[in-house]
Image (cartoon, rainbow, N blue to C red):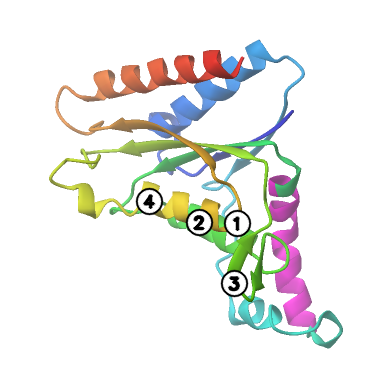
């Protein structure tokens, strides 16, 4: 089994999402020593944001693409290769300003490629990245879960589920630690997420 471990937090050693993604990978390796893990730190090595060359290349036949278009598409190839090779994605996704880190959005923009990870049909778009599992580690400073007063401000988990589902990844589990910036809530939120991780990996064993 191949696991792609992605971190996007800019908080370094203080990051809760990094702590929890590492816990998932460590425990999974203990349960499955043959697990192959690829790691990408989007905060340390952020993908380039989309350019006009990338967008225009999608509708241009390969033999008619400019050198700039070919070069821009090539920048996304390592990201696509990692995604397509993986059986499981573990994605650390803290909430920043009600959404995901811009580095993670840039990664999604580089792997959501027509003809590679989805295609257009007469019945609408169809995802091509099938049979994979995704675990989203969602961390929030406050509380945005369903039923909370701030629920409608969540453009983090909802966006990630939509984007991954669009390319065909529908087996998605969210490990959530929220309220980590609220007084007296941080340790409790992390403990609840760690307990969820243990349950999740026991069920997967």
Q: Secondary structure at mark 3?
A: loop
Mark in front: 3 vs 1:
3
| Residue 103 appears in the picture as rendered | no
Q: Which mark sits nearer the N-terminus, 4 or 1? A: 4
Residue 195 sits above or below residue 67 on the image: above
Q: Secondary structure at mark 2?
A: helix
Q: Farthest front residue? A: 123
Mark number displayed over residue 163: 2
Mark 2 neighbour density, 10 Å: few (under 14) some (14–19) many (20 or more): some
Q: Which residues are magenta?
A: 67-83
Residue under label 4, please give it. 158
Residue at the spot 45% in from the left edge and 26% down from the top edge: 20
Mark in front: 2 vs 3:
3
Q: Are marks 1 and 2 in contact (CB under 8 Å)?
A: yes
Q: Is residue 35 magenta?
A: no
Along the horizontal axis of the image, is 38 left or right of 204?
Answer: right
Residue under label 3, please give it. 123
Q: Which mark sits nearer the N-terminus, 2 or 3? A: 3
Q: Secondary structure at mark 1?
A: loop
Q: Which mark sits nearer the N-terminus, 3 or 1? A: 3
Q: Quadrant of residue 117?
A: bottom right
């Amino acid at each position: 089994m191949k696991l792609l471990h992605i971190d996007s937090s800019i908080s370094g050693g203080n990051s809760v999402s990094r702590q929890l993604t590492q816990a998932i990978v460590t425990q999974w390796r203990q349960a499955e020593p043959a697990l192959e893990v690829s790691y990408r730190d989007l905060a340390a090595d952020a993908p380039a944001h989309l350019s006009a060359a990338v967008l225009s290349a999608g509708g241009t036949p390969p033999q008619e693409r400019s050198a700039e278009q070919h070069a821009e598409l090539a920048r996304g190839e390592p990201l696509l290769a990692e995604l397509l090779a993986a059986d499981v994605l573990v994605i650390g996704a803290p909430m920043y300003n009600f959404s995901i880190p811009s580095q993670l959005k840039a990664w999604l923009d580089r792997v959501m490629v027509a003809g590679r990870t989805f295609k257009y049909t007469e019945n609408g778009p169809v995802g091509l990245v099938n049979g994979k599992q995704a675990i989203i580690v969602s961390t929030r400073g406050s509380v945005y879960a369903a039923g909370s007063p701030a629920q409608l401000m969540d453009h983090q988990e909802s966006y990630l589920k939509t984007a991954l589902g669009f390319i065909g990844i529908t087996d998605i589990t969210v490990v959530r630690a929220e309220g980590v910036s609220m007084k007296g809530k941080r340790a409790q939120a992390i403990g609840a997420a760690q307990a969820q991780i243990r349950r999740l990996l026991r069920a997967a064993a």
